Structures are given as C-alpha cells and as structure tokens.
Image: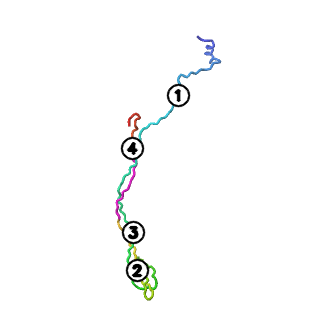
Amino acid sequence: MTFPSDQTAQRDGPPVGREDLVLPLHVEEVSVTHRRTDTAIVRVALATALRDRLVDETLTHERVDIRHVPVGRYVDEVPPPRQDGDVLIMPVVEEVLVFQRRLMLREEVHMRRVHVTEQHVELVALREQMAVVTRHPPRDADAPF
C-alpha cells in the first residue's frame, strides 16, 4: 500500500515535513580497569662474610736510650742542658753542705733517640657484605601455606 505523498517523495526527493530517523542496532562500549598481579616474589638479604688478609708492613718508631753518667765535680752554677751530636745532656745537681755551700755536678743524664725499623706481620679479619637477591614464583591464592 502506498500513500500519495510517498509517491511524490520518491519522485521528487525527501518528503516535505519529515526528518530522517536513525535507529542504532548495536552499540559498543569500553570499560578499562586494572588489577595487581604478582609475577614474582623478590627477597634481598645481606650476607656478611669474613675474609682474612695478611698485613705485612714496615713499622718505624722511636725509643729513647737513657744512660746515667756519674760526674762528681763541683760547679759554680747550674749548667744548662746541651746537645752533643744526637745526645741531649741534662745536668743533675745537688746542694752539698761543706764549710761553704757549693754546687756539685753529681751526674749527667744522656738521652739519645734511637730509630728502630722492624717488619710487622699480622693476619687481620675483614668483613665484607654482599646482597643476595632471590626470586620466587608467586604463591597461588588457593594454595595452602
């Protein structure tokens, strides 16, 4: 069955007073979500190891060689300390009561620096840390411990 206005519309173009109707047959929609998935378990542990190292070094130190040298002679005043080569001489005096007071140089202390060089060998334990990294597959949520 055709209507007179439809026949005119087919011949002359779209009908006057009508709009085109568009009916969607199918609509697609997208929804994006995210979830956390464990792919592996990573454990980092510090391990400390001891290793021995031999220390072989030359050590130098000084010691003082002290000698007491008796003198036993009278002096008029306290003599000052003096240097004789590598020996430092420190005078030691004593007051002695005679008919008159006089100074007697009792002794001299001779001090000499002696340089000593010796080889020192010692075994020393040194600590060394290492990071140990291990990877394990993830556990299933349903699996028992």
Farthest-out residue, top: 1
- Viewer-nearest of labels 2 and 1? 2
Earlier-in-chain disc, 4 versus 1? 1
Label 4–label 3 contact, CB within 8 A: no
User: What element does badge 2 sit on?
Assistant: strand
**Residue 10: which quarter of the image?**
top right
| Residue 40, horizontal then vertical, whole percent | 41, 39
Mark sitting on residue 61: 3
For marks 1 and 3, give the CA distance: 88 Å
As drawn, 133 above or below 63: above
Region rendered in magenta: 120-132
Label 1–label 3 contact, CB within 8 A: no
At 45% from the left edge and 88% from the top edge, which residue is drawn?
Answer: 100
As drawn, 3 above or below 126: above
**Residue 61: which quarter of the image?**
bottom left
Earlier-in-chain disc, 4 versus 3? 3
- Residue that mark 4 sits on: 134
For marks 2 and 3, give the CA distance: 26 Å
- Residue that mark 2 sits on: 108
Amino acid under disc 3? His
Earlier-in-chain disc, 2 versus 3? 3
